[in-house]
Amino acid sequence: MRWVTEYRRFAEECRRLAAVLTKPADKRALELMAKGWDKSADAREAKLRSSGDLIKATLEPPQPAPMKSGLYCICG
């Protein structure tokens, strides 16, 4: 479910940014991006539900943690 949560967070961030923009084309672009993130979240969630393996969602590999030097570490 971690990815679903992240995708939903990305969608919300797009909507938040769209709300403060003044150019209609820019607003529309961010709203479309938000819909895309929601669609990805819905698809991921449906896949997890159909497989019946929600535990697997919590076992996805960790993402690299950003380091100050600009390098990435994949330590747990």
Image (cartoon, rainbow, N blue to C red):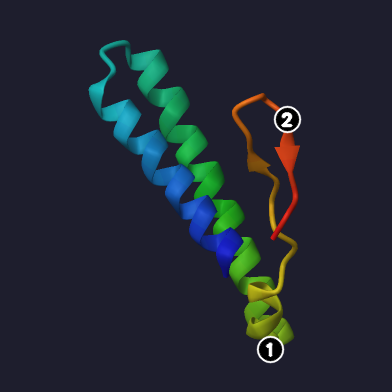
Q: Nearer the viewer, residue 37 or 58?
A: 58
Q: Quadrant of the C terminus?
A: bottom right
| Residue at 63% over, 34% down | 67
Residue type at mark 2: give it: Leu
| Residue at 57% over, 64% down | 2
* Residue at the spot of label 1: 52
Looking at the image, the residue that sits furthest to the bottom is 52
Residue 71, numbered label: 2
Question: Which quadrant holds residue 57?
Answer: bottom right
Query: Along the horizontal axis of the image, is 29 left or right of 74?
Result: left
Query: Along the horizontal axis of the image, is 74 left or right of 24?
Result: right
Q: Is residue 65 above or below residue 76?
A: above
Q: Nearer the viewer, residue 24 or 63?
A: 63
Secondary element at tag 1 = loop
Residue 73, image x, y percentages: 73, 44
| Residue at 44% over, 50% down | 9
Residue type at mark 1: give it: Gly
Give the total number of marks visible in the rendering: 2
Q: Nearer the viewer, residue 59 or 70?
A: 70
Q: Quadrant of the N terminus?
A: bottom right
Residue 26, numbered label: none
Query: Along the horizontal axis of the image, is 72 left or right of 16?
Result: right
Residue 27, image x, y percentages: 36, 22
Residue 38, image x, y percentages: 50, 52
Q: Is residue 5 above or below residue 57?
A: above
